Image: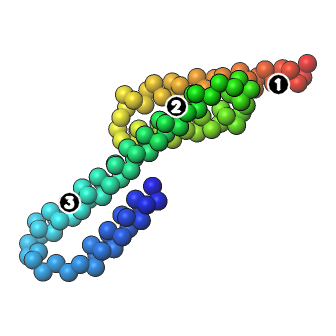
């Protein structure tokens, strides 16, 4: 993502420095600005799609963990929750609403399990 931000900043800086003598009419300037925005939107969207792939792989790798002690630790559930949250935000930014719903359900189930785990700890420590 940082590389894309740098690339966008460099592109905007280069475009601001260019001298365009061939643009005589207003519609030519508007057309150029629109094409620049389309290019920048394409860069952002491609970076978000790559992020979705990375987040999906991270979830897949975390699902492969079989050690029950590790799966019950709060650090594991926090990491998995953070990955789910980032994946949901990225999918929502890409307007993939139908793909957000099942991931959101997984996230909510994860939080419910965490709440039950917290309640169990509270009950065990007070008893």
* Front residue of this view, candidates 20 and 6: 6
SS assignment at label 3? helix
User: Contact (CB < 8 A) between labels 2 and 3?
Assistant: no
Q: Residue furthest right?
A: 127
Q: Which residue is mark 3?
A: 34
Per the image, the residue denoted by label 2 is 60
**Is residue 11 visible in the rendered structure shown here?**
yes
Q: Are marks 1 and 3 in contact (CB under 8 Å)?
A: no
Q: CA distance from mark 1 to mark 3?
A: 58 Å
Residue 72 in view (yes/no)? no
Residue at x-position 27% and y-position 72%: 15
| Quadrant for the N terminus in the image | bottom left
Which secondary structure, mark 2?
helix
Q: Looking at the image, which residue is at 35% across and 35% down?
A: 96
Tell me: 35 left or right of 121: left
2 vs 3, front mark: 2
Q: Is residue 25 left or right of residue 96?
A: left
Residue that appears at 37% across and 32% down: 97
- How many badges with numbers are in the image? 3
List x then y, in percent, for residue 51.
44, 45
How packed is label 1: few (under 14 Cα within 10 Å), some, or many (20 or more)? few
Q: Residue at x 10, y 66 (%)?
A: 27
């Amino acid at each position: 993502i940082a590389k894309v931000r740098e690339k966008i900043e460099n592109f905007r800086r280069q475009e601001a420095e260019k001298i365009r003598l061939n643009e005589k009419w207003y519609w030519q300037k508007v057309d150029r600005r629109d094409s620049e925005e389309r290019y920048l939107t394409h860069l952002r969207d491609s970076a978000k799609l790559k992020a979705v792939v990375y987040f999906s792989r991270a979830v897949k790798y975390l699902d492969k963990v079989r050690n029950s002690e590790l799966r019950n630790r709060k650090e594991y559930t926090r990491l998995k929750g953070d990955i789910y949250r980032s994946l949901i935000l990225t999918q929502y930014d890409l307007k993939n609403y139908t793909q957000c719903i099942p991931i959101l359900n997984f996230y909510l189930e994860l939080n419910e399990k965490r709440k039950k785990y917290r309640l169990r700890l509270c009950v065990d420590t007070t008893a």
